[in-house]
Image (tube, helix red, strand yellow):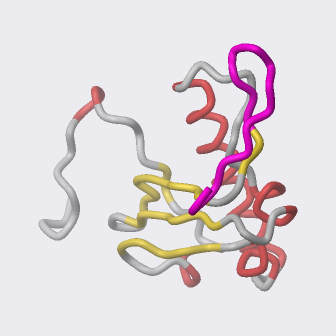
C-alpha cells in the first residue's frame, strides 16, 4: 500500500470495496458528494458500476445494523432529490459511505417517523 493510503487494519476492519475501472475516472480521492442526478449524468457503464457499489455497501450496512433491508441504495438516491451520498475514496477503494436526507423510518411500535436535516 502507498504511504498516502490509510493503514491496513487487517481482517478486523470493515472491508473496503475496490472502485470498478468504469467508475475510476469519476471518483476523486478523498470525500465526494453524490446525488441521484449526479449518478444519472454518468455514462451507462459508470452509472451501473456506481449503482452496484452503492447497493452492495448499502446491503452490507443494513446487515451490520440488523435491519430488514438496506437504507442506502442507488434507486433511493434517484427517487429522493434531497438525499445525498458522501463517498470516501482511499487509494481507489471505497472505504466508506454516508447518506443524508429525509427518511421515513418505523419505530418499535410501527409508527412512521419522518427525519431529515433540520427536522
Point out residue 102 in the picture as x, y percentages from the top left corner.
70, 56
Q: Nearer the viewer, residue 28 or 25?
A: 28
Residue for point 42% across, 63% down: 88
Span colored in magenta: 105-119
How many callouts does the rendering have?
0
Q: Is residue 91 left or right of residue 115?
A: left
Decide whether the magenta segment is chiefly helix, strand or loop.
Answer: loop
Q: Is residue 21 left or right of residue 41?
A: left
Name the image quarter holding the C terminus.
bottom right
Point out residue 26 in the picture as x, y percentages from the top left corner.
58, 82
Image quarter for residue 13? top left
Q: Work out whether 84 lies above or below 8.
A: below
Name the image quarter holding the N terminus.
bottom left
Q: Work out whether 62 lies above or below 91.
A: above
Q: Work out whether 70 lies above or below 66.
A: below
Image quarter for residue 57? top right
Q: Is residue 118 left or right of residue 69?
A: left
Residue for point 72% across, 74% down: 46
Q: Work out whether 6 lies above or below 113.
A: below
Point out residue 107 in the picture as x, y percentages from the top left corner.
70, 23
Q: Is residue 33 magenta?
A: no
What is the residue that sits farthest to the top in this orientation? Answer: 109
Q: Is residue 113 magenta?
A: yes
Q: Nearer the viewer, residue 24 or 31?
A: 31
What is the residue that sits farthest to the right in this orientation? Answer: 79
Residue for point 63% across, 67% down: 84
Amino acid at each position: 500500500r502507498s504511504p498516502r493510503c490509510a493503514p491496513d487494519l487487517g481482517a478486523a476492519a470493515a472491508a473496503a470495496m475496490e472502485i470498478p475501472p468504469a467508475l475510476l475516472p469519476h471518483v476523486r480521492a478523498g470525500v465526494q458528494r453524490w446525488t441521484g442526478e449526479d449518478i444519472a449524468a454518468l455514462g451507462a457503464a459508470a452509472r451501473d458500476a456506481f449503482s452496484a457499489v452503492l447497493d452492495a455497501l448499502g446491503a452490507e450496512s443494513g446487515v451490520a445494523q440488523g435491519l430488514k433491508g438496506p437504507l442506502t441504495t442507488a434507486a433511493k438516491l434517484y427517487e429522493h432529490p434531497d438525499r445525498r451520498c458522501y463517498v470516501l475514496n482511499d487509494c481507489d477503494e471505497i472505504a466508506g459511505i454516508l447518506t443524508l436526507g429525509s427518511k421515513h423510518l418505523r419505530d418499535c411500535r410501527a409508527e412512521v417517523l419522518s427525519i431529515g436535516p433540520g427536522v
